[in-house]
Image (tube, rainbow, N blue to C red):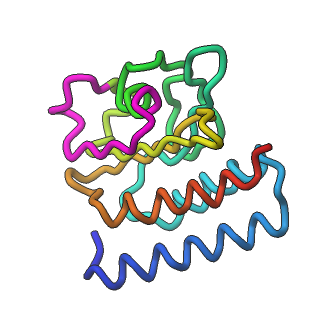
Amino acid sequence: MWKNIEEKRQTYELLLLQQKGLIEAENHWLATLSNSAALLNETLKATVFAGYYLFEEGELILGPFQGRVSCTRIKMGKGVCGESAEKQQTLIVENVKMHANYISCDSAAMSEIVIPMVKNGRLLGVLDIDSSQIGCYDVLDQEYLERYVELLLTVFD
């Protein structure tokens, strides 16, 4: 994990700057989400999945991601992603094996954070990040990843 809180904060600050630079170079939503998944996967320690589920016709559909083969469709309210999308709030799950509503797509995932992507009151999807370590995510991750999603939302009409 992180050596200390300052290292974690600096990593997230750099992540935000890198994503801003990527958006300046390319602002098409698909290209942006694709590079974003790669950036998250390379930057965040112990990541086994970093990607997006996009809201379409009442369900979440797998979008750009980095990781192993994953679930392709998730119903609203089902799993951590569906729950986050339905509530339109960030969810942090310390230990996915203990979460009653968890959908197992990759046995390597031990903890998860999901951030809804909502623009002008409209759900666009969720950012889903899974770690191979229990208890990987906290309020600092939530703060920075919510800022990260806000930045990404600028590429959507």
Q: Position of residue 101 (x, y in %)?
A: 26, 23
Q: Outermost residue, left direction? A: 98
| Residue at horizontal 84 percent and vertical 67 percent from the top | 25
60 and 64: which is toward the camera: 60
Q: Quadrant of residue 47?
A: bottom left
Instruction: Please report the bounds of the magenta region as a residue range.
Output: 85-102
Say left or right for 15 vs 130.
right
| Residue at horizontal 20 percent and vertical 31 percent from the top | 99
Q: Position of residue 78 (x, y in %)?
A: 38, 19
145 and 111: which is toward the camera: 145
| Residue at horizontal 59 percent and vertical 33 percent from the top | 123
Q: Position of residue 117 (x, y in %)?
A: 56, 42
81 and 157: which is toward the camera: 157
- Quadrant of the drawing holding the C terminus: top right
- Quadrant of the drawing holding the N terminus: bottom left
| 18 relative to 45, above or below | below
| Residue at horizontal 28 percent and vertical 79 percent from the top | 5
| 155 relative to 97, above or below | below
Say left or right for 49 vs 148.
left
Residue 54: within the magenta? no
Number of numbered callouts drawn: 0
Residue 90: within the magenta? yes
67 and 84: which is toward the camera: 84
Q: Position of residue 122 (x, y in %)?
A: 62, 33
Q: Quadrant of residue 119?
A: top right
